[in-house]
Image: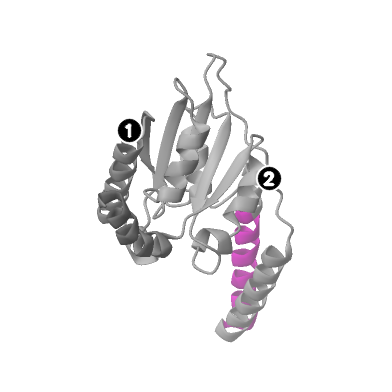
């Protein structure tokens, strides 16, 4: 489940600010009436928004159990690009026989469906893409397992690390300009948060789709 607060301190500060805001509005309402209460509420709300937006965010390092069983544990995280050939090629190059490979596909969902807790369609789509990726990897000699993860890729990684002792992380995105994850600085945030080698793979699905017929024709001839 996604937590809107990075630390307990942030959550505690939010509670205190909320109490102070409602107390100020109540006092203004008692002594100045409804319009005074509304004015105080708007002023404090704007001030809080400016403060929160301008406050520097502290990135906490994630901590998880590192397994020493003689195998490398490779965590792969990709959404729409999970079945892309560029990502598959990177996994095949990096994974040796006996390596433990876990592929996480976050369940892409709209804000409306998220807030109405309608995630079945998103999870079904992620599962279908994930199964396609795992089948293609197996055909190239890589045995991997997969899970559908949280829509937030950072949260999905955190969830996976609770039971998977990753030694390295592979993150896949669309190209710049078409990637929501890049716009949200997911790669930079992940590099700051996870103290393991992190590989960023750019998958251009449109280019791969255009190139597929030519590649198939050359193989057939």
Task: Specify the segment rendered in magenta.
Answer: 14-33
Q: Residue 79 in the image: x percent, y percent?
A: 41, 52
As helix, strand or loop, the secondary structure at mark 2 comes to helix
Q: Earlier in the sequence, mark 1 or mark 2?
A: 1
Q: Is residue 31 left or right of residue 174?
A: right
Mark 1 secondary-structure assignment: helix
- Position of residue 37 relative to residue 102, above or below, is below
1 vs 2, front mark? 1
Circle 2 residues within 10 Å: few <14, some 14–19, many ≥20: some
Quadrant of the rendered structure where residue 198 is? top right
Horizontal and vertical percent position of residue 32: 64, 82
Magenta span contains residue 43: no
Query: Is-magenta flag for residue 18?
Result: yes
Q: Which residue is mark 1?
A: 138
80 sits left or right of 3 in the view: left
On screen, residue 23 above or below 151: below
130, 115: nearer the viewer? 130
Mark 1–mark 2 distance (CA, rounded to whole Å): 32 Å
Judged by its main secondary structure, the magenta piece is helix
Residue density around tag 1, few if under 14, some if 14–19, many if 20 or more, within 10 Å:
few
Q: Is residue 78 in view?
A: no
Q: How many marks?
A: 2
Q: Residue at x 50, y 45 (%)?
A: 155
């Amino acid at each position: 489940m996604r937590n809107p607060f990075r630390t307990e301190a942030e959550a505690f500060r939010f509670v205190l600010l909320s109490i102070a805001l409602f107390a100020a509005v109540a006092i203004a309402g008692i002594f100045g009436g409804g319009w005074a209460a509304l004015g105080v509420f708007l002023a404090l709300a704007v001030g809080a928004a400016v403060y929160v937006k301008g406050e520097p965010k502290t990135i906490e390092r994630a901590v998880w159990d590192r397994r020493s069983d003689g195998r490398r544990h490779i965590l792969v995280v990709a959404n729409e690009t999970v079945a892309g050939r560029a990502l598959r090629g990177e996994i095949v190059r990096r994974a040796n026989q006996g390596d433990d490979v876990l592929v996480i596909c976050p369940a892409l969902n709209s804000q409306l469906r998220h807030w109405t807790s309608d995630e079945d369609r998103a999870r079904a789509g992620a599962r279908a893409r994930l199964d396609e990726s795992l089948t293609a990897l197996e055909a190239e000699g890589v045995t991997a397992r997969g899970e559908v993860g949280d829509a937030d890729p950072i949260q999905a990684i955190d969830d996976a690390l609770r039971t998977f002792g990753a030694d390295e992380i592979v993150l896949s995105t669309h190209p710049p300009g078409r990637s929501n994850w890049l716009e949200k600085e997911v790669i930079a945030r992940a590099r700051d948060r996870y103290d393991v080698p992190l590989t960023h793979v750019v998958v251009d699905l449109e280019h791969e789709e255009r190139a597929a017929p030519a590649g198939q024709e050359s193989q057939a001839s």
